[in-house]
Image (spheres, helix red, strand yellow):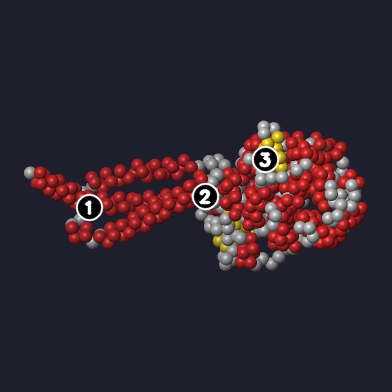
Amino acid sequence: MILSASLAGVWGMADFFAELKRRRIYRVAGAYAVVAWVLLQLIANVAPILDLPPWVARAFLLLLVIGFPLAIFLAWTREPEGDPTQRAATGSLDWALMGALVVVIALVSYQQLTSGFGTATATQKPGVETAREAASSLASTISIAVLPFTNLSDDAQQQFFSDGMTEEITSALARVPDLRVVARTSAYQFRDQNRDIQSIGQQLGATHFIEGSVRRAGDRVRITAQLIKADDGTHVWAENYERQLTDVFAIQEEIARAIATSLRMPLGVRPGENLVSSRAIDPDSYQQYLRAKALVRSRARGVPQAIEILEPLVARNPDFAPAWAQLAYAYGQMPNASRNVSIEALRRAVDAFLPKGEAAGRRAIQLDPNLPDAYWSLARVQVSRGKFLVAEELYSKALDLDPNYPDGLSGYGNLLANVGRLKEALAMKQQLLTLEPYVPAFNVGVGEMLWINGQNDAALARFEGLRGDAGITRDVAMIYAGMGRFKEAADALQEIDSGPNLPPAIKAAGVGLLRKAPAVPAPPESLPQLGTLGFIYLYAGAPERVLEPYETWVEAGYLASGGSDNALLWHPSYAPLRKTERFKAFVRATGYIDYWRAKGWPEFCRPVGADEFACD
């Protein structure tokens, strides 16, 4: 009886499945799954273009889920029509649906696997680790470089405007999470060259390019943009925009979204957010902002003029975060001009500008918490005040927002070098060059980090192609002196033209001391002031005098610059200095101790008891 009951159950299930087939339930379910998947793909691709909020896609999915049991119920209640011969003729349709269903299942599985791997990676390596990996990985699927847009305006002085459009579109694309934006500054070296796309792609490590032009005429602007594959020059997307100047932010947004969509990249913005987020500014003020930004980019030469533009600009447009960020950076740069003038001049500059820089940076973050420039500019001010822990947190936040942010990687690398984390600093500087291979300052930074890490030959090779610049030639002399090759060091200094940063008397004194090294020519206190050639004191029997400019800066409240000046103190040639009480006093005054206690001591220094330390 048990066997009979089991057989009856089996035959009952067989009848049930046969009835499902007779009523075409399988066909309905398969067709519904295929059509639903196609519709979901359609809404996923259309939603970013139309800027639809996420709830639209969720509501669409919910309707499809609810509709499935209803479709099955209707198919069950509807009596099949036609005779068995007619139904058999539709077997080919069943096989087609089955094939389509297999394809859909395969695609869904692939999407889940790839998205799962991506999520795991992001979860395991947040923050600065993500930035380091993103900067060093040349194997990313898509890397894009924005070539400088051509200025087609009648006025050649409008170059700042076309450059500004280039930078703004680049910044918008940098907010797309999976899109690797490279050569944000290096691309400018190709401005006036005949553009061999394949060659440029190889040099910059880019798989795609954006190029275009800007023409301004009165209150009208015409922008053309096109997306090109680097390997074969294929045009993926192109568009022309001719609008009022008041629509310039909308154009930037449309270009960035169109490119991301063409590359099938999710935008990664929350509902109501835009890739171009800061828009609270009138057209005339925006042009002034772009002009000031170009001046800031020229560093010391244009910073005072940029401040003259930015101060009234933020007064008129108090909610425009990018202007506040640029103003914070400009304020932070101002004391540099007074570092080698006098302690009184430096102190006045520090007191006048650093509090303003801190306030401007905080205002920028308050207005736009997603603006990497805001965190970077405030971090530089905090470095100048010796607040290294706060600065590191700010750099990390900037790199959280934009892992490939060149200024953030450079600034954070400088901080690591200044506090003695030399290997990490070198790694970050080298990773930066994978993004920006043609920026002279970044190449110099790598050369200096190679030397400080004891890689003399590699450092000299890096500087060889950059000789001619006074600062670089001085670095070459410093490297030769550190290797004991004093004649070559003196010859390198002799190549430098005298000027405001290297007066003839100081140059002559430095060359003379190097030619006599390693002999000690006179008592340490009788040696002349050497200014930017202070490293020569190490080879003239007066290592402690190396600290003279550093002590002046600290006394004036300028504990460190945004560069890597203090990193030189960790080179092996400075070991005699690090063992002195004078060096320990300098370290206590800078804020290094607090940083080391929180983050770990460098290889050259160690704690001795509760309040003492020693350096080698």
Location of residue 279 in the rendering, given as x and y in whole percent from the top left corner: 65, 42
Cα separation between marks 3 and 1: 79 Å
**386 or 103: nearer the viewer:** 386
The three-letter amino acid code for the residue at tag 1 is: Lys
Mark 1, Cα crowd under 10 Å, few <14 / some 14-19 / many 20+, is few
* Among the two numbered marks 3 and 1 on one chain, the one whose residue lies closer to the N terminus: 1
The three-letter amino acid code for the residue at tag 2 is: Pro
Which residue bears the numbered disc 3? Answer: 606
| Count of numbered circles in the view | 3
Asked which secondary structure carries label 3, the reply is strand
**400 or 519: nearer the viewer:** 519
Q: Are marks 2 and 1 in contact (CB under 8 Å)?
A: no
Mark 2, Cα crowd under 10 Å, few <14 / some 14-19 / many 20+, is some
Location of residue 532 in the rendering, given as x and y in whole percent from the top left corner: 83, 50
**168 or 183: nearer the viewer:** 183
Seen at 71% across and 45% down, the residue is: 616
